Image: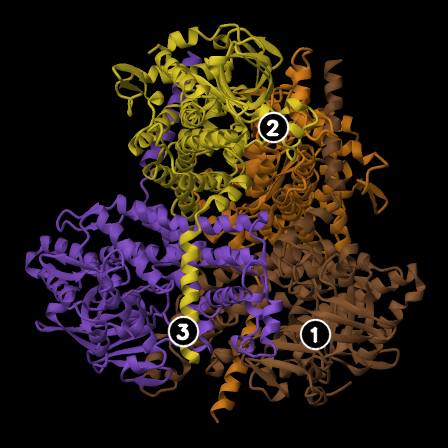
Chain colours: A brown, B orange, C yellow, D purple
Amino acid sequence: MRSAKEYLGSLADGREVYYRGKRVRDVTKHPYLSLAAEHAAMLYRLQRDPNFKPSLMTVVDGHKISTFYKLCRTPQDLLTRSRLIEETTRAGSGVFNIVQAIGSDAIMALMIVSKSLDARDPGKGYFQRVSKFHEYVAKNDLALAVGQTDVKGDRMLRPSEQVDKDLYLHVTKSTEKGIVVRGAKAHTTQAIVSDEVVVLPTRAMTDADKDYAVAFSVPTNTRGLKLIARPLVEAESAKTPEEGMMSAKNIEVESLTIFDDVFVPIDRVFLLREWEAAGILANLFGLYHRFTALSYRQVIAETLLGAAKMIAEQNGTDSASHVREKLAHLVMYREQSRMAIRLAALDAVKDEMTGIVYPNSLWANIGKLQSNTQYMSSVQNLVDIAGGLISTMPSPEDYARKDIGPLMKKYLAGNAKMSAEERMHLFRLIRELTGTMGGVLGPAMIHAEGSIAASLIALSREYDFGSSRALIRDIIRKGAARKQRTRS
Amino acid sequence: MRSAKEYLGSLADGREVYYRGKRVRDVTKHPYLSLAAEHAAMLYRLQRDPNFKPSLMTVVDGHKISTFYKLCRTPQDLLTRSRLIEETTRAGSGVFNIVQAIGSDAIMALMIVSKSLDARDPGKGYFQRVSKFHEYVAKNDLALAVGQTDVKGDRMLRPSEQVDKDLYLHVTKSTEKGIVVRGAKAHTTQAIVSDEVVVLPTRAMTDADKDYAVAFSVPTNTRGLKLIARPLVEAESAKTPEEGMMSAKNIEVESLTIFDDVFVPIDRVFLLREWEAAGILANLFGLYHRFTALSYRQVIAETLLGAAKMIAEQNGTDSASHVREKLAHLVMYREQSRMAIRLAALDAVKDEMTGIVYPNSLWANIGKLQSNTQYMSSVQNLVDIAGGLISTMPSPEDYARKDIGPLMKKYLAGNAKMSAEERMHLFRLIRELTGTMGGVLGPAMIHAEGSIAASLIALSREYDFGSSRALIRDIIRKGAARKQRTRS
Amino acid sequence: MRSAKEYLGSLADGREVYYRGKRVRDVTKHPYLSLAAEHAAMLYRLQRDPNFKPSLMTVVDGHKISTFYKLCRTPQDLLTRSRLIEETTRAGSGVFNIVQAIGSDAIMALMIVSKSLDARDPGKGYFQRVSKFHEYVAKNDLALAVGQTDVKGDRMLRPSEQVDKDLYLHVTKSTEKGIVVRGAKAHTTQAIVSDEVVVLPTRAMTDADKDYAVAFSVPTNTRGLKLIARPLVEAESAKTPEEGMMSAKNIEVESLTIFDDVFVPIDRVFLLREWEAAGILANLFGLYHRFTALSYRQVIAETLLGAAKMIAEQNGTDSASHVREKLAHLVMYREQSRMAIRLAALDAVKDEMTGIVYPNSLWANIGKLQSNTQYMSSVQNLVDIAGGLISTMPSPEDYARKDIGPLMKKYLAGNAKMSAEERMHLFRLIRELTGTMGGVLGPAMIHAEGSIAASLIALSREYDFGSSRALIRDIIRKGAARKQRTRS
Amino acid sequence: MRSAKEYLGSLADGREVYYRGKRVRDVTKHPYLSLAAEHAAMLYRLQRDPNFKPSLMTVVDGHKISTFYKLCRTPQDLLTRSRLIEETTRAGSGVFNIVQAIGSDAIMALMIVSKSLDARDPGKGYFQRVSKFHEYVAKNDLALAVGQTDVKGDRMLRPSEQVDKDLYLHVTKSTEKGIVVRGAKAHTTQAIVSDEVVVLPTRAMTDADKDYAVAFSVPTNTRGLKLIARPLVEAESAKTPEEGMMSAKNIEVESLTIFDDVFVPIDRVFLLREWEAAGILANLFGLYHRFTALSYRQVIAETLLGAAKMIAEQNGTDSASHVREKLAHLVMYREQSRMAIRLAALDAVKDEMTGIVYPNSLWANIGKLQSNTQYMSSVQNLVDIAGGLISTMPSPEDYARKDIGPLMKKYLAGNAKMSAEERMHLFRLIRELTGTMGGVLGPAMIHAEGSIAASLIALSREYDFGSSRALIRDIIRKGAARKQRTRS
């Protein structure tokens, strides 16, 4: 198990990172990217914190490894995993900590799919490669990023139909030693502070798209791998610590991750031109990752709920009937995620070949849809309860002045039993949540882990209508039987 | 265990039942009320059906009793109970079968509350009375109705503030031998085919309302008890069996149940002027009954879902993206109830004094709110998918004619692979669900087991905001700490 | 101008009408169909009522004609037409009176389209035929039905792709004297009490579908025309007048209208194999008819609103904040239709060739979508406000009894200042609106005049995005300009 | 008419403005506050732009004045006023320009209310003071701010019930020469760049609150008036011009506006302790200002709509059915405001005493509620259509690099027919709209001009239920009449 210091020390390894037009040699020394590195490092610190529950350290076969890298073999394992994500998110002030969660999502999905491919053609040896990778990752306690979503170009065209064939990542050359890949993955979270970047296909493929059916992993400092980070506007815009309650310390950074003819050695190639498996892998990873998402999203929901309840008390409106109604909707928004998590774990499915379990797809999908579709109305409820001071309140620097500070304290007081200072903190936190961070949270809550439209269609397509069909047939059959009786 | 025949034979016992202006001496001989009696009798038939699962017959202490009357002592008991309600509803073509479910809801709530009252003042002996009643009911395999909702008069006034003091049921006289009560309960389901009517208070009371804090049970043929049944419009309006697929056979009937100075012997008085316990009992019964409701409501949701899916296939539209989206919403509508049932049972709470468990209130409340508030939009989804023929299709009698019947078959065909006849059955079933039965189902799905507004307020009032508050406080505390560091 | 008596006397003309398996020789003598005839006859009665405003009688070129048959030439004409529909609906207790409204919708659309066709090929003479038909209709003050919606079979196939080619109405033979048509139109409102049935194409056609591009009119008693009426469940189920406040007197009836090789003389053929005009005609008629629909729908919205307000007062809850919120939504539901009507008339478009105006399509579409999509939630608001007694209240016959009637009066009292009798009337009216009539109103409000999905797509497809595009381009252009300045 | 230069030159007049803890002596020289000053100055530039329509300059009684200061005497005047607000907002890249709009809203409301007060007691001379103020403002072409919303403290307490009596602005002293006031107004838009601050009461008052019933105006540099500006986070966070397409140039700033014992000369006191008029004035100003708000809000809606349509085209998804549906909802969001504006002007009400018209309250309220309640779901539609690149796209500075810029161009291309550069601009604009500006726009769209809950209650309270009541009564009356006939 490595320490936070070891982890942070390893990041200046020549990786090609850009931020606002500058090449960044050491992300840990950059004023904003260092926040993302420190956020990831928190995981290594918490591993050694005996008070942190559930423990981030587990002993498997006599070796201490991160609990994230323990393969899930029972529903209880999934519940523990969910709690781990929940508590690390809570420790990060409501900001998810992805660097071991997403990688283990990918590894479990890869294990199941590769085992199944090998069963058909044992010579390919995919499973062994994935297993060795898992061992390596666990033993070295690595931080992983996953690149799945391609940049996609025209959304109505399949990969091989695009005018520029590189708009989905694909294999351009393959030999016995390895493959060369070209393309770009969007929204790769925390890749700039990861040890390795795992790549998975973004969707189901056809035979014509088989060069696009590829999965692999490479160290983040691999030649040809370019990571262009998004601007961390939420952190940059926090002129004072009070304006960045969440994002001035805890933040994750996405990059446009470009594979400019990157070579992948053959033992890190986990899927190669297996187009029939691409969709299965994409979906199975998606399922694990949606379960992960529900686990951190409930904490985001909790920030909305807690902030709404506390500002309502400050405003003196928490007993007004319309405020209560909005609070009840925020309660439901949070608890619906928890319902889905619980049941997705309890009804987990065991893959027979590997003994690994994966979350129940129906519950995970329902939970995800509720989380995606009701986020903005939850924000509306929070903003509605809080009031316009969210955006119009003066700055912390004004409050620090001796002349106007006391006037602010006087005039921004709410419920007399509470402190005006706490009220101001709450307003600023809500502004952050719904404003500067809102510009990141909104798209993430709506889009991350697949679009709403796709999920709605999936839900109706995969659902087992058997029981409801049988009920209707039975009602009609009985009705018809009565008819016969009546007429005879 | 009595037979369906014995049960039906016992109903002409002098009970005072009215229907459309006529006194009905034997409900089993009445063209419409007999449907409600036969529906209830189905429970007794299913008790003896070895193929019916879960079994309606259980052995407790060496005695065979209805599974409904087995007290729930574990989460699994609650799950079995829920399945029992689900399957009896399914057997009733989507119509709930209440006569042992609601009574056992009441008995369990009464046991817990009476035990707690006796603990404070053992002399009152409430628990013993309730226990004896439970034994009597189980041994004789009775059908019970519960009257809870008072007619209420002006909704803004408390019981004792009403102009007419009888608008909530109350005690007008009490002696050692018993009490006399006056008032009326609305919406008493299946009272006209019950053996006993159990009465519970409708809400929390104050000291001023203590005469209204009363719970008891009386045989349905007790003198002074008058049952005025609602008109069974859904059954009356089905001129042909095809037009009453559900309601021409399976139906439950509500009555306005008037207690016109009814005497209750003291051993059947379960709560007397214990105003502090009235709200607790009302809520606890409500909680059990909401759990019951979720269990049958998921089957109603299933009728909407199955009908929507099958008519979409008939219309040839089931792969259209907007139809899929509506089907997905119908899937969610059903599955949300199942989520709430599962978790309300798994997180059940054990009453220490009696060892009886009750469902978890948070999950039951959330499930109920989803069920109440999204019913009408689910109906809209079904109607939207089905199309206008729901209401404009000609009658079964037209289809039976040799001249125009074949033309109807020709012109009402949908997807060529399926039968026009099935399509017509589906349209009629949907018309019934959303039209004649809709007039009963809509108000029931929106109102039964408490109003939407009250639930929203309850959800926000009872919720434990501890975790979300702690999260917000922690975020703010850390922010403030950073501030100190920054400034120093 | 004919009298109601003359109109009713003319209906036993050999027309082939079926109801519940019986051929009906004289609809005015049938217990239920006579209601529909009387409802239509009301228009002729109101023509002579000097107090009815706006007047149903207008003098055009020295002839008295029904105001409905006056061609609209100004926005004010459209507003008057809307008021006419509103007030005749109000006079019909909230039930639309279609028999001159829909026919004039069709005539105006036919005039504009036929004029345009003739302009391209004057020899066809379509416009002259339509004009003569208009004259004939106006002079004889006829009642018209319009058949537009075909039965459609598999909804994913075009007319000529259906397995049975008759599933859309089409021309099977054409000579100089006329044409023969075969097919069936669904949901033809009031055809059984009309003088003529006008037929229009249901959608845009391609060259392959040209036999389906046909419009014409025939007398309702034409040989081969078969009208199979829907069962009037709402009227049949009203055992007492109080249970059919609306539908025991005012009702419209739809039929499945079958054209079993019907001959149409050439001077009544308004469009023949003009496939390019089919979609234009379908849309233009649809536009007129949506304007008509908004005009009667606002009165249906008014029934929901008035009933909700009055029952809230009776229940004593009209000042509760959640009830007020629901009332406000009902107010909006009604007023949104009125907004759309006003603007659709004010922004009417004049057809240059004929001088006839048609409603503005944007406002009519928006109004229609609001009306369709928010009907069920409006019903939910009404049911939520009213309470469960809607469905569980005893019958009027019970109230008429001397023993239990007074008990009902006592126990069904609400707000003490109002009468229990009015409260019962209100509950029954709401039951009718949301139950037995609900089975007709729901599908009608959701489906009549085109599906929700089609309208949403139309709204985005036809909308002029010019102004919003220009704004975005302007913002981006200015941003780019600033960039240049900044960098230089 | 003064020039932009004159206006800007007049602002360094000693006014007491604070921004981020610093006293700002000349706002026009401040890096961020100058943006707000320049934005306001745009109005003076547009006055002289002959191409700007409708003209911002009007001749009244031979004097050229700003069109904003022309009193509205006809519906057409209101429509012109609305267009003026719309086009100045459009010229400001979607950002409202308030400094003459809100002041004229206040002046018209004050004129009507003061005239009515004087009618009762002519000696008070309120109307004359307001008229003189209007003349002065128009003649000098002033920029005005209005302070209405008090800071309010505990929202459940009335002004005089607050622990700190200053939490609503009130009169602390009054003499013949003038009054002294103390208190603070929140969210005072553009006060820091205004010539005068007009103060109005925030709500209806009772006799106990009469010291709070006060309206007046003072120059912005009056002694004791302190303006603490909100931090302009949206502008501060735009590191490059492309990231501040809207807010790096066009911005309005709110302040906490503190009246620390400010003296108001008597000729500027427009309402003094007239508690019965306070609510009327608050509502009438609110009504004018809601009409103003609808006029600028439709342009904000247009930014969402235009951005959504253009990014859908770029993504190649604009013909997908679910995208079309979302676009249709965005179309409706915009057009509903336009409907309300048109009708609120057309149905304007003329105040008999002054001849000034005010917008129709029903339409203005409905429009406002639609605008408030559907803003967040409109943002959701935009974000859903656009995709996650809104937040994860790299910076403009990265694009400017020669090494990675071309890779960004390659990989961020969408629809091949359009330019990747435009796509990036669109993503950035959407990020701004929904992120950094979203933190201001969201609260403003939900809260500005009154809360949703208050509006819902107002809508149900003020509505004329007469017509709907009459309809229901008529239906019931006719039903009762039939009953009589039936029975006799």
Give residue C465's position: percent from left, percent from top.
44, 51
The answer to whether mark 2 and mark 3 are in CB contact below 8 A is no
Query: Sequence order check: which comes first, mark 2 or mark 3?
Result: 2
Query: Label 3 amino acid?
Result: Arg
Give the answer, above or below, for where B471 lies relative to C287: below
Name, please, the residue furthest toward the right: A123
The answer to whether mark 1 and mark 2 are in CB contact below 8 A is no
Give the answer, above or below, for where D104 lies relative to A1: above
Q: Which residue is at 41% across, 82% downward?
A: A396
Question: Which mark, by number, is residue C482?
Answer: 3
Same chain for marks 2 and 3?
yes
Q: Chain of mark 1?
A: A
In this rendered view, identify the residue nearer to me: A344 or A391: A391
Give residue A185's position: percent from left, percent from top.
67, 69
* CA gap, disc 1 and disc 2: 53 Å
Query: Label 2 amino acid?
Result: Asp
* Helix, strand or loop for disc 3: helix
Query: Label 1 amino acid?
Result: Asp
Q: Which residue is at 43% across, 15% downward?
A: C38
Residue C315: image quadrant is: top left
